[in-house]
Amino acid sequence: MDVRGQRLRKRSDDATAFASSMASDVHIARHVVSVNMAHMVSLLESGEVQRDVASRCLAFLIRAAGMPVQGLAEDYHQLLEQRAVDELGVDIAGYLNYGKSRNDQVATAIRMEMRSRTLDLIDSLTSIEKSILSLAERYGRSPFPGYTHLQRAQPVTVGHHMLAHFDSFQRTVERLFQLYRRVNLSPMGSAALGGTSVKVDRRRVASLLGFDGIVQNAMDGVSSRDLVVEALATCTIAMLELSRLAEEVILWSSTEFGFLEIPDEYSASSSIMPQKKNAVVAEIARAKCGSVLGCLVSASAILKSLPCSYNLDLQEATPGLWSGFTDTESSVRQMAGLLSGSTFNTALILESMKGDYSTATALANYLVKEKGVPFRLAHSVVGALVRLSVEREEPFEQTVFSHIGSVSSRMGRHISLDMQSVKNVLEIDSFLSSITTEGGSNPAFLQAQLRLRKRDVLSNERRLFRLRSSLSQAEKHLAGLASGIAKEVRN
């Protein structure tokens, strides 16, 4: 018997292949088998099917878990049921789809794969956070040029800069934990769109599949794919941050900067220029940000005008979801490995900061605190001294000492400074140690800041372990239950 029924007289293989989701269903096939198992257990427990039917169907599903996901079919759901009918006969396998639809089945299987991918992505983000913390611990107190508009701004430290990236990634980790809670609700029992008269305990099925609860509205359960958009938006946010970090790695490892040495295994040479060491992993990670963003835009465009409830258009949003997850996780993991083996050239970095005017703000603040000059006037005086230093091509310290009196007098307030005071104010370590605000770049703050971030990593790992353990226990419980019932098959 053809499980597609007798409503249609003709079928085109070409049209079936065109509309088929088989290529993408490889990602959810194992979950489809589990969904069928849990549904059949519920049908048995509610008395909707006889034990012999349930045992034979479950025995088939256990075998089906090892079957190849291939063949000409509309989707894997149809292929699986057709195989069951062909093998067991319709009198037995004809109950597999009793009380459920491909609509609630696919929505459930997608959520099961999404929750697994979400946890894997959290794991990868935690790994890059560890790499960042490792760099911050090794080089954290070393001065580093802070930039705005890609122009030298103020001195910070390596640790301060790297922790900025850490905090951005940690926000994405939190988003993913929040996403997981919304994903981990079961649509099963929604049937096609309005529920079913068949006795199916939705909460029992949800529990067997490791869900925390059910999607309350049946139509919402089968036809909403906002979680696809949310997942891809979160992946895009992660990739935006990763792309920014990759861009800095590419810049810092260039000859013009020379701040960072990346591992050879994350680099590539040139086919013609033997001296080259190209940051290809960082470049691909930067590029894949665009690919993930494309998946988000594609899914949004597919969903934007669909009426409730289920439309096959939804099928086209799913391949981009898996692609987005895959590109994000692989990019994050590769960059985590790159960072863990990278080294900062702290001596060269410090040398590059000499005479770059980046401590000029400290001089302006000093004039306010020690000379009682309004900040805006102090800002003007220091700015004029910087311009004079550039024009005269002399060290800023010398210009300040020699000309602050004449420059300030022209602005209506005579100021004088001794050379030692000028040197102390403009010295990089002095500038950094003068920072008093929480979250600032004072090296004295670093250890406390590292402790807080290590606490975040530990929390991530504990939450991840609990969620993975819960899913593993549910999977083992369902497998054991199905296996026990399947053993009752009569010889």
Image (cartoon, rainbow, N blue to C red):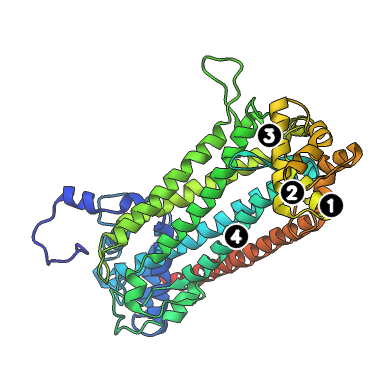
- Relative to 123, is 449 on the left or the right? right
How many numbered discs? 4
Whole-angstrom CA distance, mark 1 to mark 2, is 10 Å
Q: Earlier in the sequence, mark 4 or mark 3?
A: 4
Q: Earlier in the sequence, mark 1 or mark 2?
A: 1
Q: Earlier in the sequence, mark 1 or mark 3?
A: 1
Mark 4 or 1: the one toward you = 1
Could you say where residue 404 lies in the image, as x and y percent from the top left?
A: 80, 39
Residue 335 vertical placement versus 273 (above, below): below
Quarter occupied by the N terminus: bottom left
Residue on which the image places disc 3: 387
Q: Which mark is residue 148?
A: none
Three-letter code for the amino acid on which mark 3 is drawn:
Arg
Q: Earlier in the sequence, mark 2 or mark 4?
A: 4
Three-letter code for the amino acid on which mark 1 is drawn:
Lys
Q: Secondary structure at mark 2?
A: helix
Residue 375 vertical placement versus 336 (above, below): below
Residue on which the image places disc 4: 171
Circles 4, 1 touching at the beta carbon (< 8 Å):
no
